[in-house]
Amino acid sequence: MDRIFIEGLDVDTVIGVYDWERGIRQCLRLDLTFAWDIRAAAASDDLSHALDYAAVSERIQDFASQAQFQLVETFAERLAAVLMEEFQIPGLRLKVTKPGAVPAAAGVGVEIVRGCL
């Protein structure tokens, strides 16, 4: 299986367990890898046979703008399910980083793998 990726996609969302976090939007940085057979797209040079990463990125932005989760884990799990269902993605790896959550670290977060990658 081939892989398509989106790296360093920044999204703003409501995320966090503390009261002060519930009233603000914070940045999450996403790195995604998708399992996708690119042969049909490569042979036809036709976007309709490809995983449209612009459409995927737009959907991610829409999801994040509406999301209000306490845990990064919940954000990751729900986003993965939405993307796999809506774009018929057979597998993905999603890394969600919350910059600045721990002052001494560049970021903290989770990385999940769903389906066949």
Image (cartoon, rainbow, N blue to C red):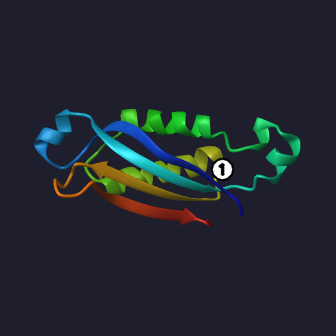
> Residue 69: percent from the left, percent from the top?
29, 46
Give the residue at x 26% y 34%: 25
Pick whichever, 63 or 58, lies toward us: 58
Q: Residue furthest right?
A: 43
Q: Is residue 76 above or below residue 51?
A: below
- In the shown orientation, is residue 19 left or right of residue 16? left
Q: Amino acid at mark 1?
A: Gln
What residue occupies the far left of the structure in this picture?
Answer: 19
Residue assigned mark 1: 88
Disc 1 residue crowd, few under 14, some 14–19, many 20+, Cα 10 Å: few
Q: Position of residue 74 (x, y in %)?
A: 35, 54
- Which is nearer the eye, 84 or 10? 10
Q: Compare residues 25 and 19 and report the one nearer the observer.
A: 25
Residue drawn at x 66%, y 39% as measured from the top left: 52
Q: Residue at x 70, y 60 (%)?
A: 2
- The answer to whether residue 88 is above or below residue 44 is below
The mark tally for this picture is 1
Residue ID at (40%, 40%): 10
* Residue 72 spot, x, y in % from top left: 32, 53
Choose top left, top right, bottom left or bottom right for residue 41.
top right
Quadrant in which the N terminus is drawn: bottom right
Left/right of residue 47 with respect to residue 92 in the rendered view:
right
- The x and y percentages for residue 48 are 77, 37
Q: Secondary structure at mark 1?
A: loop
In the rendered structure, the answer to whether residue 80 lies left or right of residue 18 reads right
Image quadrant occupied by the C terminus: bottom right
Q: Is residue 116 left or right of residue 99?
A: right
